[in-house]
Image: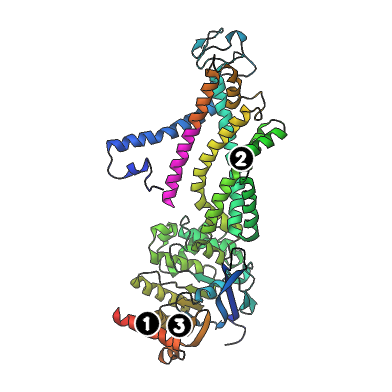
């Protein structure tokens, strides 16, 4: 791993024009990621969109067309005359919510399981490690498809289906970090003083795992968004009444030759978000990797 | 020395898992401490010396419950300490570690590190420190004063303190529970020579003020002469000689002890 980050080497005393350029370029993914979150949170308050309302007279209009009610469809309309801009905006909210829930849920489970295995070692660690080995033998999306396919479509099922493999990364990270941290002398002196084990873990080990876990969380967040889109594309994700990029992409696949924008625009939105989150995660990883 | 008072270690054996004989073979085991018997009477300071890997630190770790003994007994005032999970029994014993910086949580202030012990052992805490923040602060400042530190150290984190200051905070923390036995595992060997003397002086004065017993683990024989009443020499997990400090330095009985003393003298001459 290189010691200098793309952006952080410009924090050195000497600042050059090239350094400033790199700083600006390095900040772009974070800003874009922030825009998505803001759009997802507040966009639906500004723009009205319901998936059941659509004027069939307005179907398959290209981006920028004027609709029958006089408004402009910035991103065009789909086969049922529904506004694509609204779909992308509401889809952003769905993606951000699902990504956040999956990361929160699987992060909590992963950190709890991983730190317990790393701290207790012995049988606990053997059991956890073997369960992880078995789960890693399946492609994550396959397990998610099976779980999402068996149950009724709902938000909770999607979150659970995606968390089933998502927690593994958190568990592995916190397990290995706990294993090395528990040998540090401040952990030992706390043990010697008779501090309770749970307290030793929460106070003397977990705070030191937080940074790298945050870095991992952003990467897992991108993975969860992508996986949710894949499930929705296959018709296994959220209920049809909700708005998801995966569903929009799927609804446009018969019109790829005539109305490319239906699939392409949410596809681009998804790709840009995942790439930006990935870059942000890499930056965080480098940042915390250097500090360790 | 009576049989029950102070620390009594009888036939202590500690083993660590070694490498496997083959990929799926049984683990061999390495004996770090081999049936060692040792006592530390009340108000007595025993120095445990020996080269690296001789098992002296392992004895300390077994006493404070960081490793489980394979065989033998450890008692303090006739209470057994062999159960690793028994937190209450160990309240009378405190330990000072070698590396002053890493013995303190880098994200916690000195005051937080010191007062943490009181949360774990409410019955050993001074009156009111668990509920009253001002009382807690007073108690922390009092402890810091006892180890020669200013009150403003309380808010500082280990990264803002020098090695000697960190070790003083560690000593203050060790004293917070009013222990009766202090185990110092190479407590001064990571410090600068000048600081070393000061911290050693502090340990001696704390010992006198609180009439503590002390188990002093070191490889520095010069330090031993300054602090110890009795010396126990270890080699390869076994106790080779145990004698009064003056007797041991003037008339060592065992060849290995003589070698150790000669090596120390050589260093003194060349250094």
Numbered range of the magenta stretch: A274-292
User: Residue at left 68%, top 36%?
Assistant: A146
Name the front one of labels 2 and 1: 2
Q: Which chain does the numbered disc 1 sit on?
A: B
User: Residue at left 39%, top 65%?
Assistant: B163
Residue A140's tag is 2
Viewer-proximal residue among B264 and A129: A129
The image shows residue B32 at horizontal and vertical percentages of 54, 75
Instruction: State whether residue A219 is above or below residue B239.
Output: above
Residue carrying label 3: B228
Label 2 environment density (alpha carbons within 10 Å; few <14, some 14–19, many ≥20): some
Instruction: State whether residue A146 is above or below residue B207.
Output: above
The image shows residue A97 at horizontal and vertical percentages of 58, 33
Name the front one of labels 2 and 3: 2
Q: Which chain does the numbered disc 3 sit on?
A: B
Viewer-proximal residue among B74 and A28: A28
The image shows residue B157 at horizontal and vertical percentages of 43, 57
Within the magenta stretch, is there residue A168? no
How far apart marks 2 and 3 lie (CA) works out to 63 Å
Instruction: State whether residue B95 is above or below residue A119.
Output: below
Secondary structure at badge 3 equals loop
Within the magenta stretch, is there residue A287? yes
Secondary structure at badge 1 equals helix
Please report whichever mark, 1 or 3, sits nearer to the chain's N-terminal start. 3
Q: Quadrant of the N terminus of chain B?
A: bottom right
Q: Quadrant of the C terminus of chain B?
A: bottom left
Residue carrying label 1: B264
Q: Are marks 1 and 3 in contact (CB under 8 Å)?
A: no
């Amino acid at each position: 791993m290189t010691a200098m980050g793309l952006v952080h080497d410009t924090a050195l005393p000497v600042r050059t024009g090239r350094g400033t350029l790199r700083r600006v370029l390095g900040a772009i993914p974070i800003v874009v990621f922030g825009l998505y979150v803001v759009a997802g949170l507040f966009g639906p308050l500004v723009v009205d969109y319901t998936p059941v309302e659509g004027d069939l007279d307005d179907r398959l209009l290209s981006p920028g067309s004027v609709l029958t009610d006089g408004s402009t469809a910035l991103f065009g309309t789909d086969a049922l005359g529904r506004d694509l801009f609204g779909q992308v905006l509401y889809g952003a909210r769905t993606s951000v919510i699902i990504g956040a829930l999956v990361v929160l849920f699987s992060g909590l489970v992963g950190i709890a399981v991983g730190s317990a295995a790393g701290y207790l070692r012995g049988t606990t660690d053997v059991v956890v490690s073997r369960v992880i080995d078995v789960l890693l033998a399946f492609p994550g999306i396959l397990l998610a498809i099976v779980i999402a396919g068996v149950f009724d479509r709902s938000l909770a099922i999607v979150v659970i289906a995606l968390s089933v493999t998502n927690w593994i990364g958190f568990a592995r990270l916190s397990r290995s970090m706990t294993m090395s941290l528990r040998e540090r002398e401040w952990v030992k002196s706390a043990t010697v003083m008779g501090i309770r084990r749970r307290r030793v873990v929460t106070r003397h080990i977990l705070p030191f795992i937080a940074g790298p876990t945050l870095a991992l969380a952003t990467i897992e967040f991108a993975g969860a968004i992508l996986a949710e889109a894949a499930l929705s594309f296959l018709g296994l994700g959220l209920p049809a009444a909700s708005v998801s990029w995966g569903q929009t992409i799927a609804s446009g696949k018969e019109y790829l030759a005539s109305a490319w924008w239906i699939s392409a625009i949410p596809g681009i939105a998804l790709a840009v978000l995942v790439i930006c989150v990935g870059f942000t995660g890499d930056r965080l990883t480098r940042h915390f990797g250097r500090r360790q | 020395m009576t049989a029950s008072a102070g620390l009594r270690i009888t036939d202590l054996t500690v083993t660590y898992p070694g490498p496997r004989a083959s990929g799926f073979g049984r683990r061999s085991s390495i004996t770090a401490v081999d049936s060692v018997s040792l006592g530390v009477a009340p108000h007595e300071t025993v120095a445990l010396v020996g080269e690296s890997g001789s098992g002296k630190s392992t004895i300390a770790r077994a006493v404070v419950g960081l490793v489980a003994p394979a065989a033998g007994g450890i008692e303090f005032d006739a209470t057994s300490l062999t159960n690793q999970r028994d937190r209450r029994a160990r309240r009378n014993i405190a330990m000072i570690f070698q590396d002053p910086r890493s013995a303190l949580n880098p994200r916690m202030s000195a005051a937080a590190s010191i007062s943490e012990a009181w949360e774990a052992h409410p019955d050993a805490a001074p009156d009111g420190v668990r509920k009253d923040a001002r009382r807690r602060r007073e108690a922390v400042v009092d402890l810091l004063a006892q180890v020669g530190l200013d009150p403003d150290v309380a808010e500082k984190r280990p990264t803002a303190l020098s090695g000697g200051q960190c070790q003083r905070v560690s000593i203050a923390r060790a004293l917070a529970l009013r222990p009766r036995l202090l185990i110092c595992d190479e407590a001064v060997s990571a410090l600068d020579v000048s600081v070393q003397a000061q911290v050693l002086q502090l340990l001696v004065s704390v010992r006198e003020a609180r009439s503590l017993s002390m188990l002093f683990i070191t490889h520095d024989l010069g330090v031993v002469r300054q602090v110890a009443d009795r010396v126990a020499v270890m080699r390869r997990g076994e106790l080779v000689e145990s004698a009064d400090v003056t007797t041991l330095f003037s008339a060592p009985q065992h060849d290995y002890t003589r070698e150790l003393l000669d090596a120390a003298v050589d260093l003194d001459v060349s250094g």
